[in-house]
Image: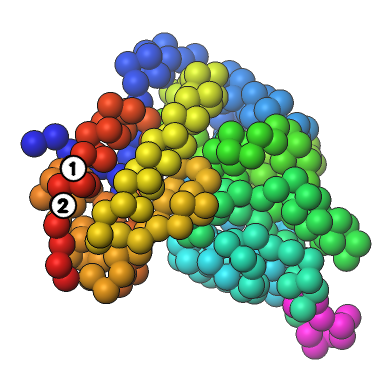
Amino acid sequence: MKKYDLRSDTLTLPSKEMRKAMYTADVGDDVYAEDPTINKLQDLAAKLTGKRAALFVSSGSMGNLIPLYINAGKGGEILTHKNSHIIHYELSSLSALAGAMPVAVEGKRGILIPEELQKHLRPDIYYMPQVKVIEIENSHNKEGGTCYKLEELKAVNDFARKNNLKVHMDGARLFNAAEATGIPVKKICSHADTVTFCLSKGLGAPVGSMLCGTEKFIAEARRIRKMLGGGMRQAGVLAAAGIYALEHNITRLKTDHENAQLLAHVLAEVPWAEIELSTVETNILYFSTGKRKAENVVSALAKKGILAGAAGPHTIRFVTHMGISSEDTKEICNLLKQISITK
């Protein structure tokens, strides 16, 4: 029985062409900044985001930790959505390693607005912690792949400038957000001081993320990366995969979004699932199992070869990616219609 893995877009595998690029990559010692392929990837990432410089890091979690370590500092507060990745899925690294405090902010479907941010600013009194950074997630994982509109990005950035705060964007799926909204990547990134995006999700590389910002910031980020154990040597074999991903796999994200829409429409029709179609913006969709236990639905899906994960007692997440073709999606849709679940 064929398996269709919808648990995450981190499950993508490098293509033969990507593997060839990795095999033939020129390499050097990146701790000496002498790996030509890493340097090329960093230049490409800076160009795509409109930033002055970029740094290759091992993961999105490291890509978020470093700028918040630098810009929030010991005892500084970071305003972020209550369901943000940095709160729920990064092992409290902001507190454990950076010494900073994330502050959970309300926001409809993951989108922060100035009115809610304002509630968390404090008087400048010596015994009160001070907000240093606003962190936004675009697209927003736990809220179902939702994306910021341009006016929403501008509103947050204007608020930050007014209050002398930095803005960091967790753009793990930045290119999905650009595809979904039609906003150019550079335009999105212009509303943040620092930006992280992942190479190892929908873009299909096996490992790595990029951290982008000013030249001065990236110079300091390189120091912190080394302190955290992230200095790499002949890592150009990994960077080559990232270059290939950025040069070949961005435009195909549209297919993942289309496949997610197909799945959502079938889920809206079957009796054991409930979904609001308007909430599906990118390649991530969450649906309710109603009174049925999510674990029972996950089990029923697995019997049909569809792998998924429960995101709550009555919630399941599907994520489309390059490992799920349009033909695969049609077959998954047929299988979904065959499933019968009573509890």
State whether the magenta stretch is mostly helix, strand or loop: loop
Q: Nearer the viewer, residue 234 or 306?
A: 306
Q: Which mark is residue 335?
A: 1
Image coordinates of residue 323 in percent, x first then y, are: 32, 31
Res 296 quadrant in image: bottom left
Classify residue 289 as left or right of residue 218: left
Would you say residue 224 is visible in this rendering?
no
Q: Which mark is residue 129?
A: none
Label 2: state its secondary structure: loop
- For the residues labelled 1 and 2, the Cα–Cα distance comes to 7 Å
Q: Please give the name of the residue rendered at 46% of the width and 37% of the height, measured from the top-left corner.
A: 257
Whether 165 is among the magenta residues is: no
Relative to 257, residue 102 above or below: below
The magenta segment is 120-128
Tell me whether circle 1 and circle 2 mark residues in contact (CB < 8 Å): yes
Q: Please give the name of the residue rendered at 34% of the width and 21% of the height, measured from the top-left corner.
A: 15
